[in-house]
Image: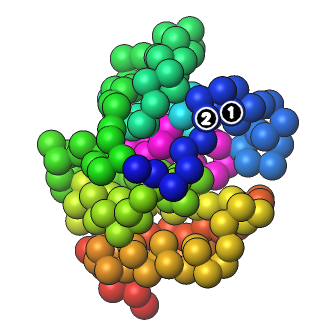
Amino acid sequence: MARHVCPWWIGYLLLSPLRRWGQNPRRILEPWVGPGMTVVDVGCAMGFFTLPLAELVGPTGRVVAVDLQARMLRTLARRARRAGLAGRIEMRGCTAESLGLLDLAGRVDFALVFAVAHEVPDVARLMAETAAALSPQGRALLAEPSGHVSAEEFAASIAAAEAASLTVESQPAIARSRAVLLAAGRRAR
């Protein structure tokens, strides 16, 4: 079981337009996501990042939105239909034990793991599954809320990512967050 899963109703607060001022999804994601890419949004909730990801990958791209809570996914599906982006987004329920991404092994260009690692009971497994899904040139953005996750806890998540053969490529500045961009199949320089 997860340490503490965000209640579904908090998903509505996470969609707040005020959040966009400090954490604008397009500004955060544009450096790494482009047309035609296959992207995974781990712990997508109601789609604060999912819909912008779908816009960035364009009509030839694909976003796989993964969440533990069916209510989050149902709300995301409704929002995606209203935005005309449902055809680019595949919603998947996962379990506390697995993301359920085996069919995507080695095929994901970018994975977003934003404010979710601290909710997972086994961060090592989360990072191993994320790494397995990434293509050899794939990247993952791991970010955690700085006011909620200590520097030591975040360092432990980075260590789990490195144990899964991901390397820290950079440390992007994201408001109210601790963040690292992880690369698959490359050694740190």
Residue at x 83%, y 43% (from the top left corner):
21
Classify mark 1: residues with Cα within 10 Å, few (<14), some (14-19) or many (20+). few
Residue 61 position, x and y percent, is 35, 33
Residue at x 29%, y 74% (from the top left corner):
164
Q: Nearer the viewer, residue 110 or 73?
A: 73
Asked if disc 1 and disc 2 are in contact, CB closer than 8 Å, the reply is yes
**Colour scheme of the rendered structure:** rainbow
In magenta, the rendered stretch is: 25-44
Classify mark 2: residues with Cα within 10 Å, few (<14), some (14-19) or many (20+). few
Q: Secondary structure at mark 1?
A: helix
Residue 59 in view in this figure: no
On residue 137, the disc is none
Q: Which residue is mark 1?
A: 10
Residue 111 position, x and y percent, is 41, 52
Q: Is residue 94 above or below residue 137?
A: above
Q: Nearer the viewer, residue 98 or 161?
A: 98
Q: Is residue 178 above or below residue 155?
A: above
Q: Secondary structure at mark 2?
A: loop
Q: Which residue is mark 2?
A: 7
Residue 45 position, x and y percent, is 54, 34
Residue at x 42%, y 59% (from the top left corner):
121
Residue at x 37%, y 80% (from the top left corner):
162
Residue 2 in view in this figure: yes
Residue 134 position, x and y percent, is 28, 58
Residue type marked 1: Ile
Query: Going by the image, does 26 lie left or right of 120?
Result: right
